[in-house]
Structures are given as structure tokens and as C-alpha cells.
Amino acid sequence: MVRPRDPDGTISNKLWWLPRDGFTGRLTVHGERLDARSSPMWVRAVNWGYSSTGKGSWASAVSFPGEGCWRLTGRVGDISITYVLRVRAS
């Protein structure tokens, strides 16, 4: 993920989480840096919405304190998905 730095020095983006049909609930998002010590990632908001097709999804606005390798986990109830991404500033 390559994004410009915000005025405060963080790197922000919106992440989309697409559930299976009929699946809803409260999404929580957590992230941790894997390649160095860091301040925590900040989850600004998690929102549920519907597209013009009527399918729902979550959008999470997140801010990373710096570049690096981050592991993100999204969880709804007892179901979770985890992935790793490289965050870079442009």
C-alpha cells in the first residue's frame, strides 16, 4: 500500500471488508507492526454500508504511524481474517 503522508506524519487509507452473502455483525479491526517496534495503528472508524447492488460491506479508515510490515486482523464474532501488508509513503 503506497499512500502520501498525512500532515501529522501518519499514513492513512480506507480498507474494504467484503462478507459472504447474508453475513453481518460488528467488525473489529486490529493491526500490529511486525518488522520493528512502533506506536499502534489507529482505527479511525468502521462503517457498514450498501452498494448500488444492495450488497453490504464494511469500510475501515485506518492510520499507520509509519512505514513497515503490518499484520491486520478483522473479526466478526468468532470469524476472523488476517493478512500482512507493506505500508509505504509516496
Image: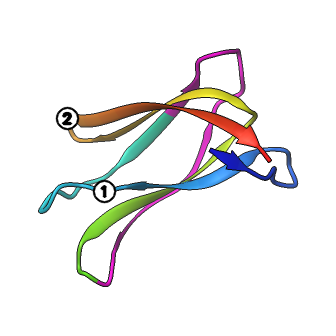
Q: Quadrant of residue 49?
A: bottom left
Residue sitting at x 14%, y 61%? 21
Residue sitting at x 31%, y 84%? 52
Q: Is residue 67 left or right of residue 33?
A: right
Q: Secondary structure at mark 2?
A: loop
The magenta region covers 31-52
**23 is higher (above) or lower (below) than 31:** below
Q: Is residue 7 left or right of residue 67?
A: right
Q: Which residue is mark 1?
A: 18
Instruction: Estimate the x, y position of residue 37 in percent, counting from the top left.
Output: 71, 15
Name the amino acid type tagged 2. Answer: Asp
For the residues bearing labels 2 and 1, Cβ distance under 8 angstroms: no
Mark 1 nearby-residue class (10 Å; few <14, some 14–19, many ≥20): few
Indicate which disc residue 78 carries.
Answer: 2
Residue sitting at x 56%, y 26%? 32
Instruction: Estimate the x, y position of residue 41 in percent, counting from the top left.
Output: 62, 36
**Which quadrant is the N terminus positioned in?**
top right
Instruction: Estimate the x, y position of residue 8 in percent, counting from the top left.
Output: 86, 49
- Residue 76: say if magenta: no
Residue sitting at x 24%, y 55%? 19
Residue nearest the observer in this picture, 8 or 53: 53
Which of the marked residues, 2 or 1, is nearer the chain's N terminus? 1
Indicate which disc residue 42 carries.
Answer: none
Real-space Cα distance between discs 2 and 1?
16 Å
**47 is higher (above) or lower (below) than 41:** below
Q: Is residue 72 left or right of residue 78?
A: right
Residue nearest the observer in this picture, 29 or 68: 68
Mark 2 nearby-residue class (10 Å; few <14, some 14–19, many ≥20): few
| Colour scheme of the rendered structure | rainbow
Name the amino acid type tagged 1. Answer: Leu
- Residue 35: say if magenta: yes
**Which label lies toward us, 2 or 1?**
1
